[in-house]
Amino acid sequence: MLRGAGYEVIDLGADVPKEKFLEHVKKEGADIVAMSALLTTTMTYMREVVEELEKAKLKSKVKVIIGGAPVSQAYAERIKADGYAPDAAEAVDLLKRLSRK
């Protein structure tokens, strides 16, 4: 959906270490980090990625969005993500709104 909307997507795959997120944000000059969780056990990892971006002083340079079955807008706010989308179509709309800010 994001590619179809004109976004360049670098798919890091599944079970990605937080260090790999940081590496690619720096290397690619990414301005968006999008993460999806399929299980509640992976939700806590999203918080760790956001925290690592903050520690590396990269959080102010990227928008972090999350989605997936076990997460919600409230969870996005709790981990300091910039937004939540319940599905891929909403993720496109969310990124359009965030890019206007």
Image (tube, rainbow, N blue to C red):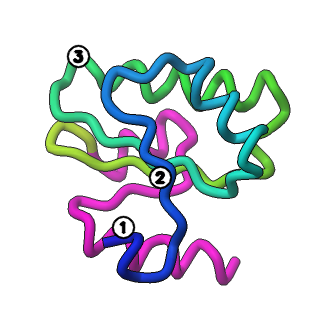
Callout 1 secondary element: helix
Which residue lies at the image location 44% right of the left edge and 72% below the top edge?
94
| The N terminus sits in image quarter | bottom left
Q: Quote the CA–CA distance across marks 3 and 1.
A: 22 Å
Q: Main secondary structure of the magenta part?
A: helix
Tell whether label 1 touches label 2 (CB within 8 Å): yes
Image position, residue 76 (x, y; %):
43, 44
Amino acid type at mark 3: Thr
> In terms of depth relative to the viewer, which is nearer, 96 or 19?
19
User: Badge 2 local density, few (<14 within 10 Å), some, or many (20+)?
Assistant: many
- The residue most toward the right is 57
Mark closer to the chain start, 2 or 1: 2
Amino acid type at mark 1: Ala
Q: Quadrant of residue 51?
A: top right
Image: 43 above or below 25:
above
The boundaries of the magenta stretch are 72-101
Amino acid type at mark 2: Ile
Locate residue 28 relative to residue 70 in the image: left or right: right
Query: Is 13 covered by the magenta stretch?
Result: no
Image position, residue 61 (x, y; %):
79, 51
The residue pinned by badge 2 equals 65
Callout 2 secondary element: strand
Residue 41, numbered circle: 3
Query: Is 85 covered by the magenta stretch?
Result: yes
> In terms of depth relative to the viewer, which is nearer, 57 or 16?
16
Image: 21 above or below 1:
above
Which residue lies at the image location 39% right of the left edge and 70% below the top edge?
2
Which residue lies at the image location 58% right of the left edge and 24% below the top edge?
20
The residue pinned by badge 1 equals 91
Q: Quote the CA–CA distance across marks 2 and 1.
A: 8 Å
